[in-house]
Image: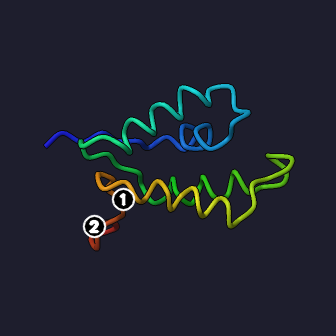
Amino acid sequence: MRMNFLSCTNVLVDAHHEDAMFHDAALSCVSRLAEGRSPWAIPWPCVHEVFAIVTHKRIYNPPTGASQAIAQIEAWMESPSLVLLAESSVHWAQ
């Protein structure tokens, strides 16, 4: 099975922020993946990073409100082809 990996936090941040330099390209990319049939993936650390970045008042003025950021992330998670990547139980096994 071929899977599209969307692991770049910046792509998700740019897709979220309309004033981002690469907003149109990022939004197009994320929309194409989310609306497509092919599996695509976001690692959980990227989800956390996106939330931390878009809601940070020193990064964005004004920052995205927590409820709006959560709504955006939940909208991405509604994609039936999305796979959320997480560490397995043997992630740190030696």
Q: Residue 94, labelled with which disc?
A: 2
Q: Position of residue 73 (x, y in %)?
A: 53, 58
Q: Quadrant of the N terminus?
A: top left
Q: Position of residue 19 (x, y in %)?
A: 74, 33
- Give the residue furthest to the front: 35
Q: Position of residue 36 (x, y in %)?
A: 30, 40
- Report the side of 41 relative to 51 (left or right): left
- Give the residue furthest to the bottom: 89
- Report the side of 78 relative to 50 (left or right): left
The amino acid type of the residue labelled 2 equals Gln
Report, in whole angstroms, how far the alpha carbon at label 2 lies from the one at label 1. 24 Å
- Report the side of 64 relative to 58 (left or right): left
**Labelled pair 2, 1 in contact (Cβ < 8 Å):** no
Q: Residue at x 49, y 40 (%)?
A: 8
Q: Residue 84, labelled with which disc?
A: 1
Mark 2 lies on a secondary structure that is: loop
- Report the side of 12 relative to 58 (left or right): left
| Sequence-earlier tag: 2 or 1 | 1
Q: Nearer the viewer, mark 2 or mark 1?
A: 1
Residue 18 found in image quarter: top right
Question: Which residue is at the front of the view, 68 or 10?
Answer: 68
